[in-house]
Amino acid sequence: MSIVRLSSRRSLWQKAQKSKKHKIELITSEYVIDESITLIRYRVSHYAAVIFGDALFNSSIVKITDVQDEDRLKAWEIFKKYEDKELSFTDCASFAIMEKLKLHKAFTFDEHFKKAGFEVF
């Protein structure tokens, strides 16, 4: 899962309109990076995981957000609240971070984000 933010601040938007370029920033968390690299390692190969990790860590558009104590606690509350949903703790941490950053769109294949009320693309 990646969290995506299209810059929407008025001044940035106006500059983007003038230059006809849109700034895209992919925001993800250390939890998502951990989960993704590990999954690729075991389902594909170590080599593929290294390529993926290098691409993320060297990207100019990917911002990796550290999960703060407040995010972890909020994620834990979300996790406990939704016993009937099959949410991973990483999903819950992503929801908490997205809420904190006021993000409403997620670039993901995970249907849990849509069910949680986020726009998925």
Image (cartoon, rainbow, N blue to C red):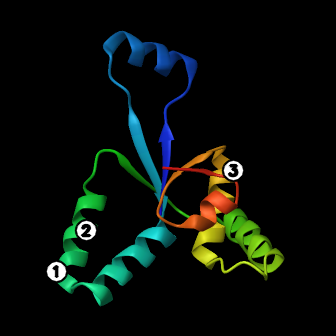
Query: Which residue is tagged 1?
Result: 47
Could you say where residue 18 lies in the image, as x and y percent from the top left? 37, 10
Q: Name the amino acid type tagged 2.
A: Phe
The amino acid beneath tag 1 is: Tyr
Neighbourhood count class around disc 2 (C-alpha, 10 Å): few under 14, some 14–19, many 20 upward: some
- Horizontal side, residue 3 vs residue 95: left or right: left
Kind of residue sitting beneath label 3: Lys
Is residue 7 depicted above or below 73 in this figure?
Answer: above
Q: Residue at x 41, y 14 (%)?
A: 17
**Dot 1 alpha-carbon crowd within 10 angstroms: few under 14, some 14 to 19, many 20 or more:** few
What residue lies at 33% left-to-right and 17% top-to-bottom?
20
Q: Is residue 121 above or below residue 85?
A: above
Rounded to the nearest whole Å, what is the CA distance between mark 1 and mark 2? 9 Å
Q: Which SS class for mark 2? A: helix
Q: Is residue 86 left or right of residue 108?
A: right
Quarter residue 81 falls in: bottom right
Residue placed under numbered mark 2 in the picture:
52
Q: So how many labels did they put on this image?
A: 3
Under circle 1, the secondary element is: helix
Q: Is residue 56 left or right of residue 35?
A: left
**Alpha-carbon distance for marks 2 and 3?**
27 Å
Report which residue position mark 3 lands on: 100
Lower position in the chain sequence, tag 1 or tag 2: 1
* Image point (47%, 58%), residue name: 28
Earlier in the chain: of badge 2 and badge 3, it is 2
Q: Left or right: 75 with respect to 62?
A: right
Mark 3 vs mark 1: which is more N-terminal? 1
* Quadrant position of residue 75: bottom right
